[in-house]
Amino acid sequence: MKSDDRNLKFLDDLANVASGAMRSLGDVREHVKTMVNGLLNEMDIVTREEFERVEALAQKAREHQIKLEKRIAVLEKQIKTGKKKK
């Protein structure tokens, strides 16, 4: 019986140590996450969503620029030939 009691106490102690270690690991994880987020904020890094939004705006601006370049080319050609497009 004493052996069984010792085994149970040992298992209880082991479970308590494991539980404490898991809590500590969770605390360390949160601390590291907070530190990394703080570092990223200090570095002024954009989020993926912000990057994709700006990328889409740049693509739209580029497409508009291409259309304008084509219009300018047509107008320049008209000026050179002295003709108006009907």
Image: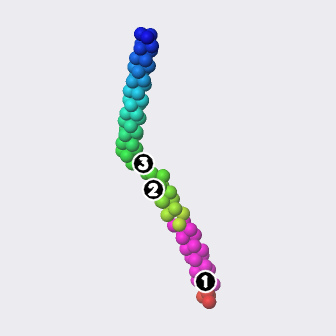
Q: Position of residue 33 (x, y in %)?
A: 40, 39
Q: At 56% across and 76% down in the image, what residue appears?
A: 72
Q: Which mark is residue 34?
A: none
Q: Main secondary structure of the magenta part?
A: helix
Where does the image place residue 50, in percent across and percent down from the top left?
Answer: 45, 56
Q: Say which element carries label 1.
A: helix
Q: CA distance from mark 1 to mark 3?
A: 48 Å
How far apart are the two marked residues, 1 and 2, measured between alpha carbons?
A: 42 Å
Q: What amino acid is at disc 2?
A: Glu
In whole angstroms, how far apart are the C-alphas of marks 3 and 2? 10 Å
User: In the shown orientation, is residue 18 left or right of residue 79?
Assistant: left
Tell me the mark number nearer the camera, choosing from 1 and 2.
2
Which amino acid is tagged 1? Gln
Identify the residue at image location x=42%, y=13%.
6
Q: Is residue 24 left or right of residue 69?
A: left
Residue 63 at least partly seen? yes
**Residue 45 shows which numbered tag?**
3
Q: What residue is pinned by disc 2?
A: 50
- Name the amino acid type tagged 3: Ile
Badge 1 is on which residue?
78
Disc 1, disc 2: CB below 8 Å?
A: no
Question: Dot 1 surroundings within 10 Å: few (below 14), some, or many (20 or more)?
Answer: few
Closer to the eye: label 1 or 3: 3
Question: The N terminus appears in which quarter of the rendering?
Answer: top left
